[in-house]
Amino acid sequence: MRALIVGAATGIGAAVVEKWKAKGFEVVALDIANPANVDQWLPVDLSEPSSIDEAVGQLSGTFDCLVSNAGLPPRDGLEEKILAVNFMGLVRCTTALLPRLNKGAAIVNTASRAGMAWRENIDQVKALMQVSNHDALRDFIAKEGIDPVRAYNLSKEALIVWTMAQTERLLELDLRMNTVSPAAVSTGILNDFASAFGDRMVKNVERVGRPGTADEIADVIVFLSSPESRWLKGVDITIDGGMTAVVQTENLGL
């Protein structure tokens, strides 16, 4: 198997690489930083369309699976870059990579439990999906009053919706795409989420006992990127240790 991953240097991406290598995969990585344990690394900045095009143009051969995992957490002042990297850049990169994928290949996009409210925010999600360049993105952020937390949540909402929307097109290409939506994960950016989401996140983690691990998220990603998950198409899998079930049960008064 020949695997391609966007965002492999740390956290969940690094855990995916480790699991693929243990299976004997050849792994090619696109990342702004140089990841360990890959067979080839090509630098890419997902916030810059020209960087994406250059990296994709340097690839050779075809791939059996693609994991798009790169992303930025909610940090002050990064509204534009969060949306540019987590959604616009990821979409551009994934779309450009489709001709590099073998028939039957799987694509897995890393979304987030923070994107679960996409139904309630579908109009704003659709508006973001129409944004085509940085100037338009800045106008969109100003018009919608987007702060860093909303930028992060919106980027993941849009990613879930976009992935679903590609399903029929990809069926015709004999490709499939799914998303995973982790909740709090014990990686180097966990503190960013604690600062952004505050007591709500802390309470949810306490109720399920601990945050997830990169290894646990990677297990699901590796499964979705394998032929064993071939009948899963256009779905979002929440990986949260029971957080969603606990909260929903409470809201239902059960």
Image: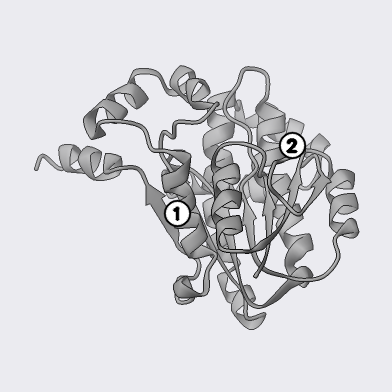
Residue drawn where x is 64% and y is 75% of the image: 169
x and y, in percent, of residue 187 in the image: 50, 31
Q: Is residue 25 visible?
A: yes
Horizontal relation, residue 230 to residue 176: left or right: left
Residue 162 visible in image: no
Q: Position of residue 104 (x, y in %)?
A: 61, 78
What x and y, as percent, mark residue 82?
A: 66, 33
Which label sits on residue 205?
Answer: none
Q: Nearer the viewer, residue 80 or 181?
A: 181
Residues packed near mark 1 inside 10 Å, few (<14), some (14 to 19) or many (20 plus):
some
Q: Decide: is 147 above or below 105.
A: above
Check the picture and name the quadrant holding the N terminus.
Answer: bottom right
Closest to the observer, 78 or 5: 5
> Badges 1 and 2: C-beta atoms under 8 Å apart?
no
Vertical arrangement, residue 91 with respect to residue 187, above or below: below
Badge 2: residue crowd in 10 Å (few <14, some 14–19, many ≥20): many
Which residue is the site of mark 2? 137
The quarter of the displayed image where residue 128 is located: top right
* Front: mark 1 or 2: 1
| Residue visible at 50% across and 66% down in the picture | 234
Q: Nearer the viewer, residue 110 or 19?
A: 19
**What amino acid type should be assigned to the residue bearing mark 2?**
Leu
Residue pointed to by mark 1: 219
- Disc 1 on helix, strand or loop? helix
Q: Is residue 2 left or right of residue 183?
A: right
Calculate the distance from the C-alpha at mark 1 to the C-alpha at mark 2: 34 Å
The image quarter containing residue 177 is: bottom right
Q: Amino acid at mark 1?
A: Asp
Q: Quick one: SS at disc 2? A: helix
